Amino acid sequence: MLEGVKAIGKAMGTTFKALTEPRDTIAYPEKRREYAPRFRGKHMLARDEDGHELCVGCGLCEAVCPAQAIRVVAAEAPTDKPVSWTNRYSVDYEVDLIRCIFCGMCEEACPTNAVRLTPFNELAAFNRLDMIADKEELLSPPVRR
Amino acid sequence: MIRLTIDDREITVPEGTMVVDAAQELGIDVPIYCYHQALGPLGACRICLVQVEKMPKLVTACTTAVQEGMVVHTRGSAVDKGRQGVLEFLLINHPLDCPVCDKGGECFLQDYTFQYGSAAGRYDEPKIHKLKDAAINEFIIIDQERCVLCQRCVRFMGEYVGEEQLLLEGRGVETVVSTVSHQPMDSQFSGNVIDLCPVGALLSIPYRYKARPWNLERAESVCPHCPVACTTSVTSREGHVIRVEGRPIPGHDWGWLCDRGRFGYDFGYVEDRLLNAWLDGEITSAAESTRTIGSWLNDTLEQHGGDSVAFLVGGQQTMEEAYQIRRFADEVVGTSKVAVSRSVKGYLPLGLNGTFEDLDRADTIVYLGQDPYDAVPVVHLKVRDRYRDNPGLKVIGIGAYDLTRSTVPGDAFVLEPGEEAAFLAYTLAKVAASNPIIARLGEELGDFSPTFKGAKSEQEVETLGRQLLESEHLVLLWDGKDPHMESVLLALRGLREDVTAVLPTFGPANWRGFERAGIAVDYDRLEAFVEEAIQGKIHLLFSIGADLLRDYPDRERAKAALAAIDRVVSVGLFFPEQRELYHAVIPGAGWSEVDGTYTNMEGRMQVAKATVQPPGQSRPVRTYLGSWAHALKKSFVLEPEWDPFDHNAGDLIAKDALPEVQSVPKPARPAMKDGALRLVGTALVMEGGMPSEILQPRIPKYPGRISLADASRLGIGEPGGELGLRGQQGMISVMVAVDERIPQGVLVLPYGVVGSPLNQLGDGAVVEAVSLEEVSLR
Amino acid sequence: MTQTFYLLRNQAVPDIDRIEVYEANQGYQALRKALKEYEPKALVEMVKASGLRGRGGAGFPTGMKWSFLPDDGRPRYLVVNSDEAEPGTFKDRELIEKNPHLLIEGMIISSYATGAREAYIYCRGEFLFGSEQLKRAVAEAYQRGYLGENILDSGFSLDIKVYRGAGAYICGEESALLESLEGKRGNPRLKPPFPAVAGLYGMPTVVNNVETICNLPPLVENGPEWYRSMGTEKSPGLKIMSVSGHVNRPGNYEIPLATPLRALIEEYAGGVKGGRQVKAVIPGGSSVPVMTKDQLDTPLDYESILAAGSMLGSGGCIVIDDQTCMVAVSARLLKFYREESCGKCTPCREGTFWMTDVLERMEAGEGTPHDLDLIRDMADNIAGKCFCPLGDAALGVVVSAMKYFPDEFEAHVTEHTCPMGARLYDTVNH
């Protein structure tokens, strides 16, 4: 009997001790964790200071991607509106975020520094198609709140 | 033969071989830019440096001929340092814009820099700027900054093709490749410079920014546009053909293409491409059309029997498809009425058929009726290749206009239209009258004597006769228009002891393959079919890949034939002409969409692989054949074990016995009123043929050609003008321009020009010029 | 200083460019002698025996060159290379402008010896006056029966055509000259086949320098023994040296070979200007390595100069005094080669361009110590790897200057200025 009380007391002791200790979990989504600045999350396509797209559609990211998650279709940049900084740009740029393993090799391969992996990692959707990020989506990168 | 050692391996090669080729034979890769086997050594780029023992300096492998006992090292510190130096020099003024360059991924400058170059450049002075992204014609863009000045393009156009349209401009580091007088290149072979360019300086405009090598699928194919059937490599991305390149076959073919073959690949994607089935002018579902046509077939067979159904095939499909159509006609329908739609009446017995190797050995080449440059361009290039090897090559053009051109100079006999066969029979009789074959040939000639446009003496005719009889290796290129020429060619073959080879330059592209698949292609069958159709003996016609109105020499007769048939079903890539004559039009699949074998003008079978899926509702012929058989509740095995290749003859179709020589009739010369013109039809690869948006800017605006004298009489100036023509059977209008090779009184018009149907008036017809208002009132 | 004159002997005679005056001064006597007394073969043998070497730069024995012509009945051509564009060389110019008939007489003799029935003079594009002189002289020679059918009743016929180039230095290279003469772009041709086998229009062709051909009339007149009495065993005879640069009397001087360099500068050319010292000498036109003041006693013959690390070349002797910056000299000469590179082969086209940029930058005081290694490495990447000799020629002065005057080059990159304060020109790309 005494043994039992002792055991309960020990257990409760552990419980109460843990109550005062700092927690490993946080109350997501009210609170969010701080990530390392080099964290590799969702992709973005960058623009230069004049607002021109940096991506020239060279397709190196597509070639290097080990998960074959990227599709690039290049075209001659329209001359009437300044979309690209050069005469070639990507008319289609898709990243399949289900396939993507966030290795960052696309970022490394990019000769114009257009593809960048943002720290944004809140990737969830109700259907698979929504997980394919198109060019428009990538050009306006999501921000972590 | 010379023995030498390359990288410790011995090899024996013929004298005069360059070290680079000897190394290639051993599988040792020596980098090259400027060297090309077809063009010979130049020694400009200096990248192919190798070390030869006992030579003080590094030498270029492409300019050094092998010598007995030579010891060559293709790698080593000195060689690598030399190559690294050359690459560094090549890159100092290079814009280093690989990400936007279409050559990226298949560029020799990238490859060799990766292999031999240094990791970083040391050049930090300002670069020289040159012209970028400038079009040198409708298809090709030049970037002079990326150019390594290997001169392959310049030498190909100038030395190989003989049309000097590219040159080097400027001196030293400011040297650039440019077009002559900055005018667009208009050579039929301009596209080859894209294949030849080792870097991204000359690029294809239609392929611009379309893809990268890693998202391409390449398939070995064969060009479908003319009977030469050049070997090609078809590039597709995401189910679209986006590029065609030449595919060299070592020791047999350099892989040159004409611009029609290289850029005319988009006929599958033009707006007119059939994507749906049409029944009586209405779009319908594939299932509905199949059911309906199946019931038509069923009804016709029940009411009129198998022979009331006919098949008209176009001659463009693969041999396998031809075989399936024939078996379907034989086994399922039970009809013998299978004809090939053709525009010329001639036939060439297989036994006379030569190969391109004959061109490589020829000492005399005769063009009969047609200039190969326009009709079968790559054959012209092969003739030119032979002329480069053997400047003594005799070229003789015999036709209704001057068939020779400056790139391969020759002697031209300009005759009255349609008299080539009679003229040759006459010529042979002059030099071998006693021969019984010649006597037989000339039985019906009577008092025929040729009249020449431009002076030709009887002496020259006799010389021609001797050349024909005595040349060591005679090759004739025949346009197939005059059926009596067959006998002349047979007689010539019978008289001569040395090789006599004939290459048929006429279409349809795969007619020889159709013959091999069991469909007789002779014109008589087509004529018999048209006759029976007009007489109402045919109740259901399947026109597969054919367009009778466009092909058949007499348009009115073709119209009457089609109108007389109860039900006409067309399967093809496009609507046939005057589609109201057809009751059902269903979309077929063609080149690049079906696997199959094509046979070219030398009787060589070549396989073309499918690269893409047929678009929309279009399906291969065998799909339709299967479904119609199903509608008849008959079994039809779709994949028969038929291999067109003959194990004895290899990829060449086996030769058969030659027919008897028939006599050549005396040609009738129609009465010509003052100012009348005679129409001469010709098959031109650019003007006729399948629609193409890419080629549109190149297709001549003025396909008709007349002499300067006629042009000034009719008030046609530069660059050309429209002319109304009236013949016995109607009127057409034609865009014509002046061509100095055309004699007075002749109007040359290609077959298949949209809006100017030659067969409305008839090939060889006498026509007179009328005002355009008169034509529009007709 | 007494000068022996043979080629330049009549240069001072007024109106010697006119055929009457030339004839009055023993003109066309050698031709008469050659046509009358010699068989063509004997003439070739005589030229061989004389040891005459090509004066265009390479110094190849002329008689041997002639004997390379294949005897296969094809037409032969003689082409005289008058495309004298080498900086520092101006001997041919004087010969054709002042005494064109000497060249024509020599050409007739050479054509007779080599069996050519047609001869061409490829005149440098800038030699407008020279080519006019030649054309006029050729017309005169036709009038007097020295050219055309059956010359002087000997049964020998010859036509001479004068062609003026379009101003490219590379056309002085014999195969580029032939391309240009055929109307093509003046790029050098692949050798072999050499011009002797397949030259102009693919036919056997002899290409000789103006001075070489001008040697023939005196040679025929005086015989090979006389010729051999001057110069050395391997370099016999006379040579016109064009002296320029910092000397008191620049000009053409005809000297027996093996005359010491010092004698040429001090005695013939009157010594260095302003009493200054010789710093370096480019003895044979801008394509050859420099010689230093320590080598002034070198005899001017092909072998001795080669042993001294340079070449006699075309005889354009450029004297550089001790106030001159060798980096500036190198940069200026290299710029010439950069402009004159034909653009055919990579190392010459790009290498001369790059190296000029670097040298000009150094001269402008913007060099880095790394540049010296860069130039040496570039020179190594050009040397012996070019299609024709132009690439190597471009390096001659630069490489030797860096060898003999390393301190000067070092000073440019360490002190970021030119120690001589030299500004030969100020068209620096930077």
Image: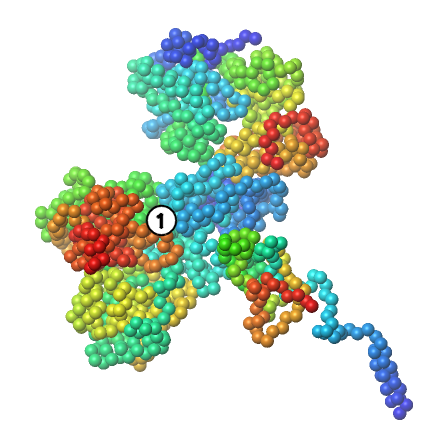
A61 lies left or right of B242:
right
Q: Residues within 10 Å of mark 1 (few under 14, many from 20)?
A: many
> Camera-side residue: C390 or B99?
B99
C430 lies left or right of B625:
right
- Residue with the most extreme bottom position: A1
Q: Quadrant of the C terminus of chain B?
A: bottom left
Residue C234 locus on image (x, y percent):
52, 19
Residue B262 locus on image (x, y percent):
39, 54
Residue B70 locus on image (x, y percent):
50, 40
Residue C169 showing in the rendered view: yes
Count how many numbered circles sit on residues in the image. Answer: 1
Give the residue displayed 66% in from the left and 21% down from the top.
C322
| Quarter location, residue C158 | top left
Q: Is residue B642 above or below residue A3?
A: above
Chain hosting mark 1: B
Residue C299 locus on image (x, y percent):
58, 17
Give the residue displayed 36% in from the left and 47% down from the top.
B187
Q: Is residue C213 above or below residue B32?
A: above
> Camera-side residue: B123 or B319?
B123
Residue B500 showing in the rendered view: no
Mark 1 secondary-structure assignment: loop
Residue tagged by mark 1? Answer: B188
Q: Quadrant of the N terminus of chain B?
A: top left
B667 lies left or right of C346:
left
Give the residue displayed 36% in from the left and 71% down from the top.
B276
- Residue with the most extreme right position: A2
Give the residue displayed 47% in from the left and 19% down from the top.
C93
> Camera-side residue: C81 or C384?
C81
Q: Looking at numbered disc 1 in the image, what kind of residue is underneath it?
A: Gln
